[in-house]
Amino acid sequence: MSTCGQKNLEGLDFELELPLGVLRKNALLGYPIVCFQGQGQYTKSIKTVEDDIQTGIKRVNELTGIKESDTGLAAPALWDLAADKQTLQNEQPLQVARCTKIINADSDDPKYIINVKQFAKFVVDLADSVAPTDIEEEAILYVFSVDRNKYQIHIPLPPKIDPTVTMMQVEEKPDVTYSDVGGCKEQIEKLREVVETPLLHPEKFVNLGIEPPKGVLLFGPPGTGKTLCARAVANRTDACFIRVIGSELVQKYVGEGARMVRELFEMARSKKACLIFFDEIDAIGGARFDDGAGGDNEVQRTMLELINQLDGFDPRGNIKVLMATNRPDTLDPALMRPGRLDRKVEFGLPDLDGRTHIFKIHARSMSVERDIRFELLARLCPNSTGAEIRSVCTEAGMFAIRARRKVATEKDFLEAVNKVIKSYAKFSATPRYMTKPLHFLIYILLCVYKCKKFQNFYIGGKICPRN
């Protein structure tokens, strides 16, 4: 850095290099001084002291024989193998056992029946470091032998769960709220009654003496917001959220799918409250039939285990289950009965108000003009799903990018409607979603009749179908 000059301040003996910096007032002695940006007047002194400290530390380590090691082990000269071997010999070996039954669980001195595999069963007590609340029936634990015929429970072990099942748990709460879901007002209210109210206000059901519903089936066409509503419910509650894709439970080997379902509900029961969302449940929940080849037997076993966990001999606990599918007609009747799935919520195509709301939801995060007529755009998208409306907003942004503009205009949205709704109609899931030319023309005429500002509306011969 170049030096602009050197100044001797009154009463100060040191010299300051004047950089091309900013002159600011320093509280030191009340004098205006010029300071380096990123380097003060005591920088060299502090650096010297830090170097002296590091040199002193190295000198002390050399005198005491301390050396840094990448493995974290001490020097071989400091090893005491004989003492370590003696310590290992004096320690009591731990054995793995399973608690099969708890005797007098409510008393002050409960007893526990444990089963040491391939050896024997014992009635044992707890060690001083273990609390009675840490032990449950069928729990796996470490026991150690006080003498040859007496054991004590030393360490309770966590349940053994497949890592694949553990990865299904969603650690971070989804960022989707109810305000981000449009066109599903009635469906959201039904979901909140079944899922949110029992978790947040369980006393209401206790006072009435009824059991809250524990299962909900979400069904409807693709892209209508089923998964989005499940994410919004998970955001609202503090319960553990587990998301399972139906095809993940279809395994290669016999019994693997049923085992994963058991471990999934075992992990859910270990939580205070849990919400399990099965997406595309028709992958394993189809109606049972015999095709003669036995190819679907494993899938049916997985579904039978799921049915047993939903409403079988053992209580489900504070677990809420959401299932989503596009084909409710293919599901097994045993899976659909009340007690397993108490509510069936249909997600249909949004109406005019719903489509307008969806347009506003996606446009509020975009840079758009103020006077865009979203109701008009919604009228031009009849029989459209929320996913298609989102695609319209994305394409409108792409048109603005191609035109090198920072703001999307109404014309961009109109061209996006022409591209997505008309051009992509042949890729719809079913013929029901395809827009007929006559219906499309009727919507155009209604727009002309009802919209006062239609003189600014540009059709350009692209909105109407080719026929």
Image (spheres, helix red, strand yellow):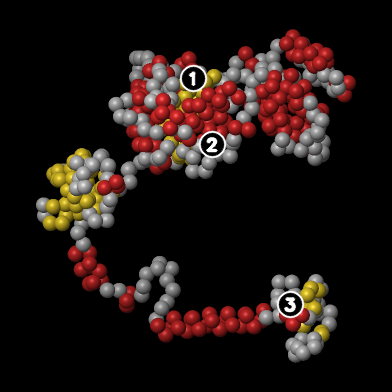
Compared across the picture, whether 458 is left or right of 174 comes to right
In the rendered image, is residue 253 in sight?
no
For image coordinates 79% across by 13% down, the residue present is: 446
- Picture layout, residue 41 above or below residue 448: below
Would you identify the image quadrant in which residue 75 lies? bottom left
Q: Residue furthest right?
A: 455
Q: Earlier in the sequence, mark 3 or mark 1?
A: 3
- Picture layout, residue 386 above or below residue 22: above
Residue matched to label 3 = 27
Q: Quadrant of the N terminus?
A: bottom right
Circle 1 sits in a helix, a strand or a loop, which is it? strand
Residue matched to label 2 = 236
State the image coordinates of residue 405 (x, y, percent, origin top left): 82, 38
Residue matched to label 1 = 344
- Picture layout, residue 437 above or below residue 151: above
State the image coordinates of residue 338 (x, y, percent, origin top left): 40, 19
